Amino acid sequence: MVDVGLRYADLSAWRRWQRRRHPLRAVRGRLRPVRTAGVLTRGSAEADLLVVLDGLSPSNRAALLAPVAALAPERVAVLSPVPVVDLLPEHGWSEQRWGDGEPLGPVSAVLTAGHYLALGAVGHAEARRRDVPELVVQHGLLTPLAPPLPPGATLLAWSAADADFWGAERAEIVGSQLLHDAAAHPAPATASSPPLTYLGQLHGAELPRRDLAAAAEAFCAAHGATYRPHPAERDRASRRTHARWEASGMTLDRSDEPLSALTGGVVSVFSTGVLEAAARGLPAWVDLPTPPAWLEEFWDRYAMRPWGSDPTPAPARPAVEPARAVAAALEAIG
């Protein structure tokens, strides 16, 4: 049994690690403190179920906004960094700019993805101040560098193994809406086998960039795979690497097509896209020469299969759609 778990058991330690990763950003933050601000969208003046999200990535939308469709809109308030009305069910929503310290209206329960980013921290503080329940919904795969859970919160986890890994004191297993949505859009049958797609992760903090780049370059060269950069690979170092690869003849996917448009097999080191592809019925694998112990545990926890073995099996689908399970859990405590 590999002894792995969260590397940082408290939020202060996790934030210190973040500052060490981005020293210039940390200095700018100290010199120019930014007031926490966002957009507060309410279904009515009596909305008391507060949903808080710090970004609009597909995983955040699936975890935090999809459950809104299963709630009475009159009870829902959403605190977000940008407007989200177009992503919500049709209703007479009100929308206003919100700043730190301003009222959030009546709150009987809070749903967040954690308290490690600005608005999530606001939601956690509001739950503590009002002494109301806080639910944290898992929105992605968990590595040892995941932030710790808010104290006192109940985790809505993808699996019992993830709840144990994250050290949850209280947890309900709801599954993943992201993977549920992927399974609802199976890949079409094709007469030919499209080239493999290698899902890039040069932005990942869990492994050295040089190792991630070397693994991607070697695999694509050996198997004729197309490299698909992660959306976060926009920094100067990543762009230089991409340019060098293209100059050497490596094919990069420069399109903005969603992952759901892929029709061939995928390979990555530890991308959620491996499970999304498997859920759609595509062959999917993970690959890294000499993986560290934590990565082998990660692959095992998510049943990801290494290259050269049978493809990763499709994740099990829960009996209740995860978004509906999250909504039911929120209603039950609010």
Image (tube, rainbow, N blue to C red):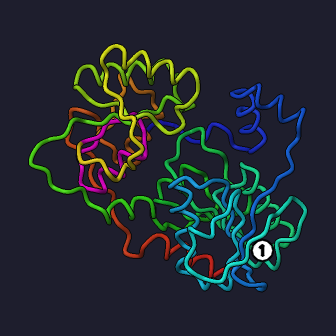
Q: Residues within 10 Å of mark 1 (few under 14, many from 20)?
A: some
Q: What's the magenta region?
A: 265-284
Asked which secondary structure carries label 1, the reply is loop
Residue at 47% x, 37% y: name it: 230
| 48 relative to 308, above or below | below
Residue 278 magenta-drawn? yes
Extreme residue in the left direction:
191
Estimate the x, y position of residue 170 in percent, counting from the top left: 62, 65
In the displayed structure, 222 sits above or below 74; it is above
Residue 283 image position (x, y, % from top left): 23, 45
> On the image, which quarter does residue 52 sit in?
bottom right
Q: Quadrant of residue 213?
A: top left
Q: Write down the quadrant of residue 156 in the picture.
A: bottom right
Name the residue at 21% across, 32% down.
308
The residue that mark 1 highlights is: 132
Q: Is residue 6 above or below residue 211?
A: below
- As rendered, which of 241 and 316 lies closer to the eye? 241
Vertically, is 232 above or below 77? above
Q: Is residue 89 magenta?
A: no
- Disc 1 residue type? Val
Q: Quadrant of the N terminus?
A: top left
- Percent across and percent down for residue 225 are 27, 29
Tell how many labels.
1
Q: Residue at x 66, y 83 (%)?
A: 92
